[in-house]
Image (spheres, rainbow, N blue to C red):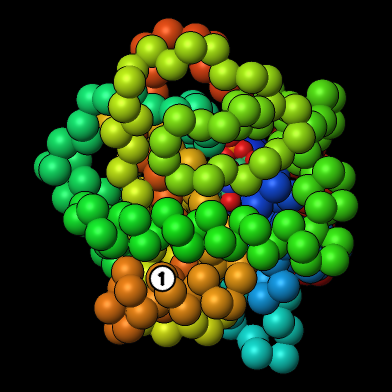
Amino acid sequence: MIIETVDHATVRAALELACRAPSVHNSQPWRWGLGQSRVHLHADLHRWLPATDPDGRDLLLSCGAALHHLRIALAALGIRVDVHRIPDPGRPDLLAVLDLSPEPTGATDLESARAISTRRTDRRPFSSWPVPDDYLDQLTERAAEQGALLRVVSDASTRHTLEEAIAAAAEVQALVPGYATELAMWSGRHSSVDGVPAASAPPADERREGPTMRPYTGGEPAGPQQDPRDAAVLLVLGTSSDDRLSQLRAGEAMSAVLLYSTTLGLGSSPLSQPLEIGSTRMVLQEQVLDGTLSPQLVIRVGWPPATGPVPPLTPRRELADTVTPLPV
Ligand SMILES: Cc1cc2nc3c(=O)[nH]c(=O)nc-3n(C[C@H](O)[C@H](O)[C@H](O)COP(=O)(O)O)c2cc1C
């Protein structure tokens, strides 16, 4: 009998792509265990940001994004994956076990796989071109495929409530002990394998309109805005419960939405501050998601400005620093 095994060079190539996933402060809080036909995804609690993310929600979302990136990359490279999420309550850092087999699934999303290498968080004001409703519907479908709801905040009053909550969260968070230190430690970087580079920070001066952006260190003053109006759309990702499994799945949905936005040519940036503060998370739950769902993340999408430098791709750690062999 011939037992077919998966090609390890291919799995490593997929893991490289998985590590391109977005993560809070580019902390890359994941570790991989690599076996013959199996990959383990672990949360790396040494990379948890307790002042910014006291509940560990952002950490779970970040790992969920890496999991979705890996699923997409493996499928595109012809490897079938069976995923067991949060498989062992006695090992809370073990978030997923992926069983791999060398037969293709047929369910490949090549466009999203290609988008992994070009997606980036874009914190610039977006252009005045409206995002077509049809595109927003497609993003909503992508989130639903991953078991999450994406609420498009289209009416002016809910948008106002959401922007107020984002601004309030930023004010409260600025006073949280350790928050400013964490932000300073993890941003404004010039040559580092993690953290938010100075070149990716939002403009240093007040944006003319739109939601408050997290004030990462290093932003340059914005040049004159090309378009008088930033037509960015705000989306709120929600799940039916708020346990660790839901947060992991929300990260997978976030990844699906961000990658698909990239394939559509849209710019995007996650905004997690209102979820990191209990009082504003309640506002999102009660007044944006009508009390029925647990909010997990705000995502801003829009058409990037036609001119000016595109934010660079952010760096990642060496794959070797994130992978350990699984015991045979
Ligand atoms: C869970 C999560 C929360 C995030 N929160 C914010 C945020 O509040 N503001 C922001 O500008 N970027 C936020 N980001 C974007 C990260 O800073 C970004 O993904 C990281 O720096 C890597 O850069 P890249 O997305 O360009 O690859 C968040 C990302 C994740 C996954």
Label 1 is placed on what type of residue?
Leu
What quarter of the picture does the C terminus occupy?
A: bottom right
Side (left or right) of 208 relative to 230: right
In the rendered view, tell whether residue 218 sits above or below residue 32.
Answer: above
Side (left or right) of 2 relative to 107: right
Residue at 21 percent across and 31 percent down: it is 130
Q: Kindly tell me whether residue 162 is visible in this rendering.
A: yes
Q: Mark 1 falls on what kind of element?
A: helix
Residue 320: horizontal and vertical position, in percent? 81, 42
Side (left or right) of 191 relative to 84: right
Q: Which of 246 and 55 lies nearest the eye of the viewer?
A: 55
Q: Which of 274 and 50 lies nearest the eye of the viewer?
A: 274
Residue at 58 percent across and 62 percent down: it is 169
Q: Quadrant of residue 244?
A: bottom right
Q: Kindly tell me whether residue 106 is visible in this rendering.
A: no
Q: Which of 28 and 53 lies nearest the eye of the viewer?
A: 53
Residue 250: horizontal and vertical position, in percent? 45, 66
Disc 1 target residue: 284
In the rendered view, tell whether residue 317 sits above or below residue 42.
Answer: above
Q: Quadrant of residue 288?
A: bottom left
Residue 129: horizontal and vertical position, in percent? 23, 25
Q: Residues within 10 Å of mark 1 (few under 14, many from 20)?
A: many
Residue 113: horizontal and vertical position, in percent? 42, 37
Residue at 42 percent across and 36 percent down: it is 209
Side (left or right) of 91 relative to 126: right
In the rendered view, tell whether residue 217 sits above or below residue 155.
Answer: above
